[in-house]
Image: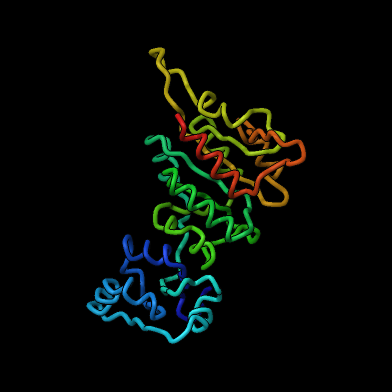
Amino acid sequence: MKNKLNKELAVCGFEAVKSLERNSPDKIQRLYFTADRAAQFGDLCRSMAQRKAPYNQVGSGSELEKLCGSVHHQGVVAMIPQPEILRLSPSDVNRWVEKGEDVLLLDRVGNANNLGAIIRSAAFFAVRNIVIPLDEAQAGITTSAYRVAQGGMEKVNVYSVKSMENLLVDIKGRILVFGTDVRGKESIEKMNVLRKKKRSDGTEKLMPVLVVLGNEEHGMSGEIKGLCDYLVTIPSPADDMESLNVAQAAAVILYELKRR
């Protein structure tokens, strides 16, 4: 939930707020918690007192619900500055290539809970870069996304890009692009074989990879499909189930990508 007047975002959920405490405590501008959570945030309260940041124990969970707009607050809400999504720059792309960093590109994933779950999986599998389009159909960083990410938001870089098509053209030949599609010709099991590239001395290296995840209802757009090097799919032993939820698919694909 955004506080537009103060340009704040409410972060709720025990693990999400604990992650803020561990990684970015100075981001927390205000803290609210129920009595049963007081002991678990004692250290944070003391550090906030030192920098004269307000914190309060509230009388009921309904007060927290009003602050964050969610019943899933788990007894604690932290107010932080509204996160700014970084604009992707050529230097970011060059770093990915030089360091062999893998990337996720979300093609208008519209559900904030799915965005949070994808960020959580990316953090777990050490994929630190996620790119989202500047498009109203794409979910942004919200209270629910933060909560579902379960601390993953502090572990990844989320970038925005005006044109996904221009990005894919720019990285052609430097980063291998896998699009995810239920009718893809290649199984995800082949990704680490397909990403191998011969060096001039005859040895092999693994190219950095960008994986495109499509919209929950429509999948990837036709333009994006056409710019992928490969379209990959998750094989299913069930005849009557065509696909997974996009967040579930992301976890499976990232596991396979890192299983090498």
Q: Residue at x 57, y 39 (%)?
A: 168
- Looking at the picture, the colour scheme in use is rainbow
Kindly identify the residue that appears in the image at 53 percent across and 79 percent down: 65
| Residue 161 drawn above or below residue 189 | below
Image side of residue 92 versus residue 108, left or right:
left
Examine the rendering and report whether any part of residue 9 can be seen: no
The answer to whether residue 123 is left or right of residue 66 is: left
Vertical side of 69 occupied by 192: above or below: above
- Which x, y percent locates residue 164? 59, 46
Residue sitting farthest toward the front: 36
- How far from the left and from the top, in percent, is residue 41? 32, 72
Name the residue at the left extreme: 50
On-image quarter of the C terminus: top left
Residue 216 position, x and y percent, is 67, 51
**Is 235 on the left-hand or right-hand side of 13?**
right
Of residues 158 and 253, the one drawn nearer to the viewer in this rendering: 253
Farthest residue in the right direction? 240
Who's the residue at 38% across and 77% down the image?
31
